[in-house]
Amino acid sequence: MGCFPTLTLGIETSCDDTAAAVLSGRTVLSEAISGQSHASFGGVVPEFAARAHQENILPIIDRVLSLAEASGRGLGRRQLGLIAVTRGPGLMGSLLVGVETARALSLAWRVPAVGVNHIEGHIMAPLLDSDVAPPFLSLVVSGGHTEIIRVDDVGRYSLLGATRDDAAGEAYDKAARIMGLPYPGGPEIDRLARAGDPRAFDFPVPFKNTRAVEFSFSGLKTALLQQVSGMHGDLPLADLCASFQRAVTDALVSKTELAVRQTGITTVCVSGGVAANSALRSAIASAAPRVVLPAPSRCTDNAAMVALAGYERAVRGLELPPLVPDPSLSLCGRAI
Ligand code: KG4
Ligand code: ZN
């Protein structure tokens, strides 16, 4: 028998965002996020990220608990029934801050705590704002992951295909660096691409015609680098961004369509930071009879998705994984 926590506190510190959220059942009562600016370093610096988490985590948790109390639902922090925290995959120093904070709060408040797989959190994100239920296919596209996962139920996942090299978000970030754009590259490329011609440059769409669900983005990055290296003067940024984005989007959409055909599963949920991309959001809509996209703020890392993943496990009576950080935690039997 599962337990039915009234309130769940979610904590997310796997990479550079410190986030917390409070859920009442499956409803988000409050959420807060403190992003770090790594733009000047061109990427996330693990040591810097861990220190910032340490500074931010308690004020953020305090804020979401106060906001939940003030939400007018008559719920105080004494109704807290579960703490859910990301335990991996991610950066060790970052994960440790969240996990140790959850452990301390769990002991002090005598509330059970569960370690959540960050990817399971992304898979759950579309369920926060819609009535979608398994079975569905989950396209997870983030800075560290590009996978299509078959979700038969909470806790029952099979990996249909993944990237062979760079993740889609990583490709965006590397492409941005090649073009001299700030980190993170995805939102910047998305913005610049709006004024560009997606056919201006004929960048390759890797594995487009293979019969397997698989991705590769490193060749695309090299094609962009070669193109840019041969150019003089100001770069045609809008056209480069639009063409690069078209190639990434084509790859993601065509393999999602293939996975739908191969499995016969007609509902697709999309999540992870790249799911905030405007071109992907419009192109993926026709990949399956039902496509569910979370709000852009729930595509990127957030704590509401972590709270929901912990809650769904608790109500089903599933094993509550221990509070042990694991930077290469796997979801489907192998590290993905
Ligand atoms: O899920 P997320 O916040 O963190 C990870 O778990 O990795 O994803 C971050 C990634 C970054 O690579 C960022 O460039 C990308 O998501 N991203 C986007 C957009 N917003 C964020 N990529 C394309 N278009 C966007 N609008
Ligand atoms: Zn993520």
Image: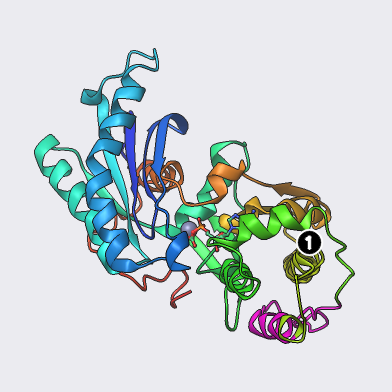
Residue 52 is situated, as x and y percent measured from the top left of the image, at 28, 53
Tell which of 58 and 69 is nearer to you: 58
Tell me which residue sits at (35%, 16%) in the image: 70
**Horizontal side of residue 275 vs 207, given as left or right:** left
- Which structural element holds mark 1? helix
Residue 195 is situated, as x and y percent measured from the top left of the image, at 82, 54
Tell me the chief SS of the magenta region: loop
Which residue of the protein is positioned furthest toward the left in this rendering? Answer: 108
Magenta stretch, residue numbers: 202-226
Tell me which residue sits at (53%, 54%) in the image: 123
Residue 286 is situated, as x and y percent measured from the top left of the image, at 83, 53
Task: Give the residue at mark 1.
Answer: 238
Tell me which residue sits at (18%, 54%) in the image: 100
Dividing the picture into quadrants, the one containing residue 49 is bottom left
* Number of numbered callouts drawn: 1
Dividing the picture into quadrants, the one containing residue 116 is bottom left
Q: Is residue 262 visible?
A: no
210 magenta-colored: yes
Check the image and report above or below for 183 versus 191: below
Tell which of 1 and 263 is nearer to you: 263
Check the image and report above or below for 127 versus 277: above
Mark 1 within 8 Å of ligand 1, using the beta carbon: no
**Horizontal side of residue 82 vs 331, given as left or right:** left
Inspect the image, locate mark 1, and give the three-letter code of the amino acid beneath it: Ala
165 magenta-colored: no
Tell me which residue sits at (23%, 60%) in the image: 96
Residue 158 is situated, as x and y percent measured from the top left of the image, at 55, 69
